[in-house]
Image (cartoon, grey):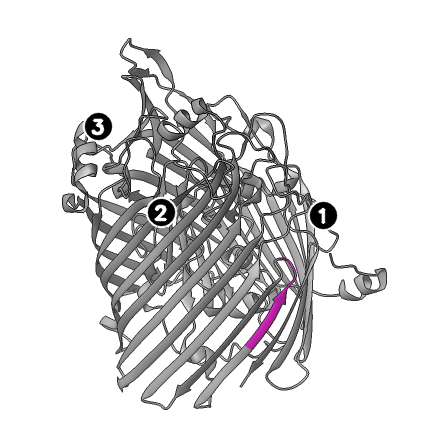
């Protein structure tokens, strides 16, 4: 653990840090990719503008620049989004097992925006959707936050609330949009060649990362190549109990190795037309010794060792055409994007258990223990493996255009486009020594295709200081299972379980209306209303699994309806001199929430099914401010509070055959809503050096705002906490930057609700093993040329 003297603390506390700034939502996301030569690799000058958000859109959107990502030394998407008070990333400690739990296995599982998370948040990179999260049973779960490498980010944009026009109607919680590096990020203005090399070390997980990139711009031809590698270990916590079994409270030992490659080649055909080809590939490998799943006693069937080997891969190939024509007319700019993305997750687990010691245990072991034989040491040791795979392949084409037409006093800024994509998903459960009467391999759901077609039209009417934005989007989806992907055993199970393969299709029109009025630069009120809808997932429609030993069955539901949302936001923003502010209140109402619910016992088997069973109501307030105190000094603050409730039907009766009658239910707290948070900071920046300090305070999660699980256990809660971070950088020579960051300066012990919100305890609170990392140091060196 890093030790700091009082003199060192006092010296470094004179630093400052700027806020993540909000900016204008781009009219069309597919036309975001530009090659403006920004020279972002150089430190920003001391006359940097106080505010980097525009005041001309009726929505809450923030942007995190590459400069801010580098200054913070972000190593994951969780670090990148850490300064957004209403956005969190769920990352739980590894507490999974071979067959009964997946807690912590998905790493950066989900991004949460204003209390809604999972696949309800749309995540894209360069306009291409990243793979969905997948969950099957208690021990197979994939996340969404580890398909990219933060060293490749040119910027990150976060759009809050439903937005059914630009990004897709299924962005019912919001959008996280990352833009990968462009040639203009490497080649500075006025030069033809540029690049960077970067190396860093983070004490928090004892990790090293190295990256390098080079680009060229010869006028007509442009290109770039970048590669990065990151290797490290488990992330620290405040607990150091390192027993090699389930009494362990320290994190499990882990080795992490990731590699990323990005290549682009562009051709400017003429001043109005340009084409761009892109290839990127990400590979992440994790090896975990799951010590906290090991039994300290040699009991029959108790785990003796548990090792996990996980891989996450994503590869993208895309071809884009850009048109930048006249300044006015029905078509001023256009972007065509053809892409192919392949992604996969593999989770391999090897478990050894203590075997039988007598004849009775031997019979139990053979027929009900899901194990066979003994180990070579003759001590009754047995081994089994699980090899789970999830794959997503997506092919898509998107065409978007802009226009500018004037009719009298009204300026019409038009946006319109079409998009079509086809996603093919596959999940396979394999291994050795399967469960009783369940042969390997098997598919918990048939391979399925998800076809999406969309079109949208938007007109932003500008009349002086008044802007009225009206738009509509039409989305149609179709889910089609592939019966041929099921083995003979899978098909027999499907028929025996009463299942029927079903296709599912639906469509919807979703409107959006926004009004913004610039009364004065210091007072700009706005209002927005938007609807959205999200289709069911293929695995929810055609699920197929039954475990007779555990008396558990998961069945599909071809009658699922899309989830829907209607969201409103009212806000005001403005700037006066060196001071800028933004206030917003929002209200989103969700219907037909899809979730897993028990149908009761049928022939002694507990049947589970995904149903449209709930409504949700999320509302809250947000505030941001920045103040340029002096040319080199800037202060910032951001605050967010959200309240969410879920209406879940309750069982009011049961028949003799085990079927359950559901009533209207009651409103209960929505557990994914985060406690109130406030983040403040200050930054001092000159041409040759700079520093920052950041302070975050989070309120706790009380028992009254936690929805208890149906198991009768309690969920862990969190206490309020305050954590301070600081950093500094210096430029000893042109192009070179040396940085140092200290996280959790005062070594506070605390837990984040985002990381423990779904954890249950049957005995009592045991939270220190879920604590956030202690004080740690991070250093880096970067040279741009």
Residue 571, percent from left and from top: 48, 48
Label 1, on which residue?
A: 748
Residue 1 lies left or right of residue 766; in this view the side is: right
For the point 68% across and 83% down, which residue is it? Answer: 732
Residue 77, percent from left and from top: 50, 57
The reply to whether the C-beta atoms of the residues labelled 3 and 2 are less than 8 Å apart is: no
| Crowdedness near tag 2: few (<14), some (14–19) or many (≥20) residues, C-alpha within 10 Å | many
Query: Is residue 201 shown in magenta?
Result: yes
Label 2, on which residue?
A: 388
Q: Nearer the viewer, mark 2 or mark 1?
A: 2
Residue stretch in magenta: 198-204
- Give the spatial CA distance, label 3 vs label 1: 52 Å
Instruction: Identify the image quadrant of residue 129.
Output: bottom left
Give SS at disc 2: strand
- Give the spatial CA distance, label 2 vs label 1: 38 Å
For the point 58% across and 54% down, which residue is it? Answer: 234
- Give the spatial CA distance, label 3 vs label 2: 22 Å
For the point 45% across and 25% down, which residue is it? Answer: 361
Magenta stretch prevailing secondary structure: strand
Residue 370, percent from left and from top: 38, 33
Give SS at disc 1: loop
| Crowdedness near tag 1: few (<14), some (14–19) or many (≥20) residues, C-alpha within 10 Å | some
């Amino acid at each position: 653990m890093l030790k700091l003297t009082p003199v060192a603390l006092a010296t470094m506390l004179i630093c400052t840090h700027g806020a993540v700034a909000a900016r204008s939502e781009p009219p069309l996301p597919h036309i975001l990719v530009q090659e403006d030569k920004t020279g972002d690799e150089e430190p920003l000058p001391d006359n940097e503008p106080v505010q980097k958000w525009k005041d001309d859109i009726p929505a809450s959107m923030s942007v995190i620049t590459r400069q801010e990502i580098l200054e913070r030394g972000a190593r994951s998407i969780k670090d990148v989004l850490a300064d957004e008070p209403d956005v969190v990333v769920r990352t739980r400690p590894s507490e999974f097992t071979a067959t009964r739990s997946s807690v912590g296995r998905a790493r950066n599982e989900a991004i949460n925006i204003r209390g809604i998370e999972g696949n309800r948040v749309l995540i894209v990179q360069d306009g291409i959707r990243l793979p969905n999260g997948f969950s099957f049973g208690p021990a197979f779960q994939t996340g969404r936050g580890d398909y990219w490498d933060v060293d490749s980010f040119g910027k990150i944009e976060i759009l809050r609330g439903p937005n059914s026009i630009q990004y897709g109607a299924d962005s019912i919680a919001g959008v996280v949009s990352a833009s990968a590096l462009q040639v203009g990020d490497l080649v500075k203005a006025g030069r033809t060649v540029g690049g960077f090399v970067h190396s860093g070390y983070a004490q928090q997980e004892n990790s090293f990362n190295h990256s390098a990139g080079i680009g060229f711009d010869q006028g007509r031809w442009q290109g770039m190549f970048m590669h990065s590698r990151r290797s490290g270990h488990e992330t620290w916590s405040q607990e150091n109990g390192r027993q090699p079994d389930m009494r362990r409270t320290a994190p499990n030992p882990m080795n992490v190795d990731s590699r990323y490659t990005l290549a682009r080649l562009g051709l400017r055909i003429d001043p109005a037309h340009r084409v761009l080809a892109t290839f990127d590939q990400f590979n992440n490998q994790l090896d975990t010794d799951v010590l906290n799943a090991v039994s300290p006693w040699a009991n029959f069937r108790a785990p003796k060792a548990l090792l996990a080997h996980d891989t996450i891969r994503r590869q993208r190939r895309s071809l884009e055409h850009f048109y930048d024509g006249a300044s006015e007319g029905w078509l001023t700019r256009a972007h065509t994007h053809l892409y192919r993305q392949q992604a996969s997750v593999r989770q391999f687990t090897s478990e050894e258990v203590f075997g039988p010691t007598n004849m009775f245990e031997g019979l139990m072991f053979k027929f009900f223990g899901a194990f066979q034989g003994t180990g070579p040491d003759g001590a009754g040791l047995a081994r089994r493996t699980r090899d789970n795979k999830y794959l997503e392949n997506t092919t898509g084409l998107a065409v978007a255009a802009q226009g500018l037409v004037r009719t009298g006093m009204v300026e019409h800024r038009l946006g319109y486009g079409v998009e079509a994509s086809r996603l093919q998903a596959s999940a396979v459960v394999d291994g050795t020594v399967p469960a009783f009467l369940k042969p390997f391999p098997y598919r918990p759901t048939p391979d399925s295709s998800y076809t999406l077609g969309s079109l949208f039209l938007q007109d932003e009417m500008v009349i002086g200081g008044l802007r009225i934005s009206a738009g509509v989007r039409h989305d149609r989806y179709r889910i089609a299972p592939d019966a041929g992907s099921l083995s003979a055993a899978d098909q027999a199970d499907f028929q025996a379980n009463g299942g029927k393969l079903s296709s599912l299709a639906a469509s919807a029109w979703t409107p959006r209306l926004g009004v913004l009025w610039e009364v004065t630069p210091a007072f700009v009120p706005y209002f927005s209303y938007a609807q959205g809808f999200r289709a069911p997932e293929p695995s929810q429609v055609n699920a197929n699994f039954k475990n007779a030993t555990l008396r558990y069955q998961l069945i599909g539901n071809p009658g699922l309806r899309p989830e829907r949302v209607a969201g409103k936001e009212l806000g005001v923003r403005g700037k006066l001199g060196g001071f800028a502010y933004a206030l917003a209140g929002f209200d989103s109402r969700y219907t037909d929430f899809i979730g897993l619910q028990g149908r009761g016992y049928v022939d002694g088997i507990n049947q589970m099914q995904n149903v449209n069973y709930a409504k949700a109501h999320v509302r809250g307030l947000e505030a941001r401010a920045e103040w340029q105190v002096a040319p080199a000094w800037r202060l910032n603050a951001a605050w967010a509070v959200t309240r969410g409730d879920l209406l879940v039907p309750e069982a009011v009766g049961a028949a003799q055959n085990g079927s359950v009658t559901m009533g209207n239910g009651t409103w209960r707290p929505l557990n994914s809503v985060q406690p109130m948070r406030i983040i403040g900071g200050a930054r001092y920046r000159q041409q040759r050096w700079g520093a920052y300090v950041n302070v975050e305070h989070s309120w706790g999660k009380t028992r009254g705002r936690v929805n208890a699980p149906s198991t009768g256990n309690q969920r862990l809660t969190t206490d309020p906490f305050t954590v301070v971070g600081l950093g500094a950088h210096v430029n000893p020579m042109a192009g070179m930057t040396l940085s140092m960051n200290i996280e959790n300066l005062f070594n506070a012990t605390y837990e984040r609700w985002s990381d423990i919100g779904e954890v249950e305890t049957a005995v009592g609170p045991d939270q220190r093993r879920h604590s956030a990392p202690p004080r740690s140091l991070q250093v880096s060196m970067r040279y741009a040329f």
